[in-house]
Image (tube, rainbow, N blue to C red):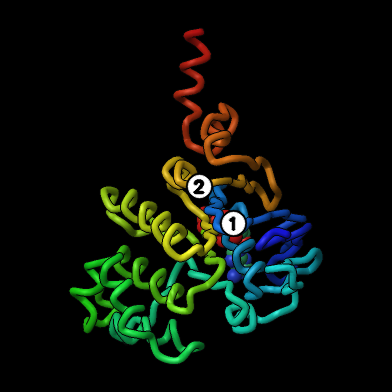
Amino acid sequence: MSLLEARNVVSGYGDAEILHGVDLNVENDEIVTIIGPNGAGKSTMMKATYGLIDCWEGSVRFSGEDITSLRPNEVTRRGLCYVPQKENVFPTLSVRENLEMGAYIDGNPTEDDLQTVWDRFPILSERRNQRAGSMSGGQQQMLALSSALMIDPDLLLVDEPSAGLAPDLVDNMFDRLVDIRDETNTAILMVEQNARQALSVSDRGYVLDMGENEFEGDGTALLESDEVAALYLGEWYALNCKQQTK
Ligand SMILES: Nc1ncnc2c1ncn2[C@@H]1O[C@H](COP(=O)(O)OP(=O)(O)OP(=O)(O)O)[C@@H](O)[C@H]1O
Ligand SMILES: [Mg+2]
């Protein structure tokens, strides 16, 4: 049994069908990355999985339970948390208050929980009393991720964790995601634009294009695929040159 099993998910907004039957699995302790062009439906797939928008067809199972029709708060209680692509912190609350909001289902965060956050992202410790909205995009991203982890979920959906980070901090974010998986056994399903770096820390990956599955495979297999590189990793030019010199 997979931890997460989405089958033939059809969904969208109003009359616009965006996902045309997407399949996706996450196993226990896996890091899985979804890549694909802008507008491919990656964020929409995250929202349909978490119950923020309805699945028009298909099903989503989590830990063996059918969660297709559950609302986000019910999904969270079952151990599946979601960090949206944008507006993912309470801007007028302090860093510490944001973490308390993240923990609210279980009561208040323990000092150990908070210490884990301060150790993982020392900048959040320095800014623990600062309003979240006054921090950089990258720092807000670290806070959003940390808030979602406060209830120790079995699976974390993260939409573009490296968005807004300075280039030299991107690898650090992916390293922290690997630490989180290794230390807490939380599986991670992320969407990423920094596809090459994300796939290199992922067990498996999916390519979504125009609301459909295009490719899936081991992180390394996707990275080594000339077709994926050419179409989805922005390396068409490099591949073309390689073929011309053969
Ligand atoms: N709230 C919404 N209402 C209507 N259409 C939407 C909404 N959100 C997204 N869409 C449309 O759905 C399609 C897929 O969007 P989605 O945000 O899932 O793409 P994405 O793959 O996450 O792209 P990006 O890489 O830019 O984040 C796009 O055509 C987008 O305009
Ligand atoms: Mg998106």
Q: Is residue 136 left or right of residue 61?
A: left
Instruction: Find residue 39 and report its horizontal and vertical position in percent.
Output: 58, 54
According to the picture, the residue beneath numbered tag 2 turns out to be 202
Query: Above or below — where is 94 with respect to 137?
Result: below
According to the picture, the residue beneath numbered tag 1 turns out to be 42
Q: Residue at x 52, y 72 (%)?
A: 153
Is 196 or 41 nearer to us in this picture? 196
Question: Quadrant of the image for the N terminus?
Answer: bottom right
The quarter of the picture where residue 99 lies is bottom left
Does the numbered disc 1 mark a residue whose Cβ is under 8 Å from ligand 1?
A: yes
Is 51 or 236 nearer to us in this picture? 51
Residue lying farthest right? 57
Instruction: Find residue 125 and report its horizontal and vertical position in percent.
Output: 22, 74
As drawn, the label of residue 212 is: none
Residue type at mark 1 is Lys
Query: Above or below — where is 73 with respect to 156?
Result: below
Residue type at mark 2 is Ser
Q: Residue at x 46, y 25 (%)?
A: 237
Instruction: Find residue 119 and report its horizontal and vertical position in percent.
Output: 26, 68
